[in-house]
Amino acid sequence: MKTCWRGFSRAVGQVNTLMGYLSAVMIIICTMALTYEVVVRYFFNAPTSWSLEFNIFMLVASTFLAAAYTQIKRGHVGIGMLDSIMSARWNRWRYLVADLASLIFCSFVSYYTWKFFYMVWDQGWVTESPWAPKLWIPYFFMAFGLTSLSVQCLIQIIDEHLVSLEKGE
């Protein structure tokens, strides 16, 4: 059973790492699209109708896709000073409580985001711009990213906290 869990944990970590790198590429694409918009607007006085929404969709997607990768690296907001003040044992408990709270919150929001995604998909919502992209796109990335973050929190709880509790640390 531990071998299956380790394989699952490793696979999820690899997917989340890939999503983190993909999110970095998406930010680079946003930068290029925004630069294109500025150049076309300035030199040719011809604004694009798609650039703003494209960049918003890409930044939403990159933000939520990178969330689980950021959790792997423990890059979310934390109180670093407590690491040096508290003992290793108390820090493990502090991380456990934070990971459990994150898991509960992210799972709750993920559930409702998936429900909202389905509603937007089912009803065919689009933006009100002339380009009119489908609104399910950003909601899918929000739901997928929050689900990935929830799974990553669960993996960290099991890998980091339950294993140390089993060892009696």
Image (cartoon, rainbow, N blue to C red):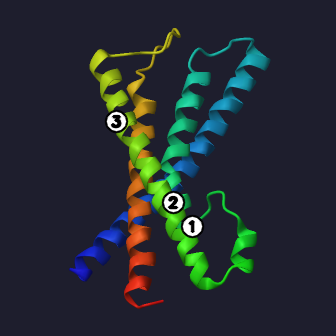
At x 55% / y 27%, what residue is drawn? 54
Q: Give, as a three-letter code, the residue at label 1.
A: Lys
Q: Secondary structure at mark 1?
A: loop
Q: Residue 127: image x %, image y %?
A: 48, 15
Q: Which residue is mark 3?
A: 114
At x 38% / y 72%, what residue is drawn? 158
Which disc number belongs to residue 136?
Answer: none
Q: Which residue is mark 1?
A: 73
Q: Nearer the viewer, mark 1 or mark 3?
A: 3
Q: Residue 20: image x %, image y %?
A: 52, 56
Q: Give, as a three-letter code, the residue at label 3.
A: Trp
Gap in angstroms between the C-alphas marked 3 and 2: 20 Å
Q: Residue 76: image x %, image y %?
A: 62, 58
At x 40% / y 35%, what residue is drawn? 113
Camera-nearest residue between 130 and 72: 72
Q: Which residue is mark 2?
A: 69
In the image, 107: left or right of 36? left
Total numbered labels: 3
Gap in angstroms between the C-alphas marked 1 and 3: 26 Å
Q: Secondary structure at mark 2?
A: helix
Q: Residues within 10 Å of mark 2 (few under 14, many from 20)?
A: many
Q: Earlier in the sequence, mark 3 or mark 2?
A: 2
Q: Give, as a three-letter code, the residue at label 2.
A: Tyr
